[in-house]
Image (cartoon, grey):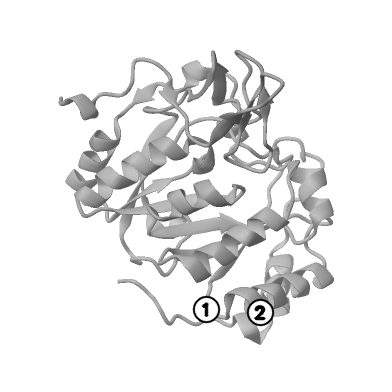
Amino acid sequence: MGTRDRFPDDHFPARWWHALPDGRIQCDLCPRDCRLHDEQRGLCFVRKREGDALVLTTYGRSSGFAIDPIEKKPLNHFFPGSTVFSFGTAGCNLACKFCQNWDISKSREMDRLMDQASPERIARVAADHGCKSVAFTYNDPVIFAEYAMDTADACHARGVQTVAVTAGYMHAEPRRDFYARMDAANVDLKGFTDEFYFRQTGAHLTPVLDTLQYIVHETDCWLEITTLLIPGHNDSNAELEAMSRWLVDHLGPDVPLHFTAFHRDDKMADVEATPLATVRRARHRAGPGLAPRVHRQRA
């Protein structure tokens, strides 16, 4: 293997941070703005201060790999019928009480990351298996952005596309760098009130809306959106209609919106699974402005 084909022996230097006057270091990757003393980790758990610098502790380390249909991401209009090579790491910069990958996204055990692979090796394996794209998924690629971006560069060198499956919670500067390397994204729009975001994810709505608008208006990245419907929490007619109006007004009518069904998991084991009738109602409430249409399908 060449030099760049090896994963790092030490923690990888992180980008997007600055030193504070009080001696702490602030991570500038996402709106959490974690301020760290030496040896402290951010809320995501994978970005850590070591000495006078910030490092990414999961570069070159994955929680697993799989070959999936692209529709599983879900992306229905990005090379439909193709296969995608999927991988993720561990940790997350949100704290969703309903997380359905909680064993990965909330892992605090680095020894769960049993598989090691350089960006070049991932690109090579994806190409060798005939995958049209590589997806950064399972946990949010925002928190391993350096690894995802290097992998995207390696993929593009081999003619392989890249996909981000993300909550879209990041600051403007890293967002520009990150989406410059993504060919498609599925962004989880988890609800449409700031109260829901704050109470159920520990985050805020506005940065996610900013990401959606940035992708559509400032990049060539193909976008699809997914909303997980949680009974009694984000599935009211008023919220669904407000969300749909915002999407049409700010993104246009051509961005696909997926509604998916919640099942009991993590800290929401007391909430019933989403009935099929709720998914159908959501589709109806989305209105004619989001009627199925495809004007930019990639094939």
Task: Report helix, strand or loop for mark 2.
Answer: helix
Q: Which of marks 2 and 1 is in front?
A: 2
- Residue at figure coordinates x 83%, y 72% from the top left: 238
Relative depth, front residue between 254 and 276: 254
Q: In this view, does 3 lie to the left or right of 13?
A: left
Residue closest to the far bottom = 288
Label 1 crowd (10 A; few <14 / some 14-19 / many >=20): some
Circles 2, 1 touching at the beta carbon (< 8 Å): no
**Residue 177: numbered disc:** none
Relative depth, front residue between 192 and 209: 209
- Residue at figure coordinates x 63%, y 60% from the top left: 210
Query: How far apart, in angstroms, are the residues tagged by discs 2 and 1?
Result: 11 Å
Residue closest to the far left = 1
**Residue 254: numbered disc:** 1
Label 2 crowd (10 A; few <14 / some 14-19 / many >=20): few
Position of residue 119 measured from the top left corner of the image (x, y, whole percent): 30, 36
Q: How many labels does the image show?
A: 2
- Residue at figure coordinates x 33%, y 41% from the top left: 151
Q: In this view, does 84 lie above or below 32?
A: below
Position of residue 246 measured from the top left corner of the image (x, y, whole percent): 70, 73
Which corner quadrant holds the C terminus?
bottom left
Mark found first going from the N terminus, 2 or 1: 2
Asked if one can make out residue 137 in the rendered structure from this viewpoint, the answer is yes
Q: In which quarter of the image is residue 193?
A: bottom right
Which corner quadrant holds the N terminus?
top left
Name the residue that disc number 2 marks: 249
Q: In this view, does 38 lie above or below 57?
A: above
Asked if one can make out residue 190 in the rendered structure from this viewpoint, the answer is no
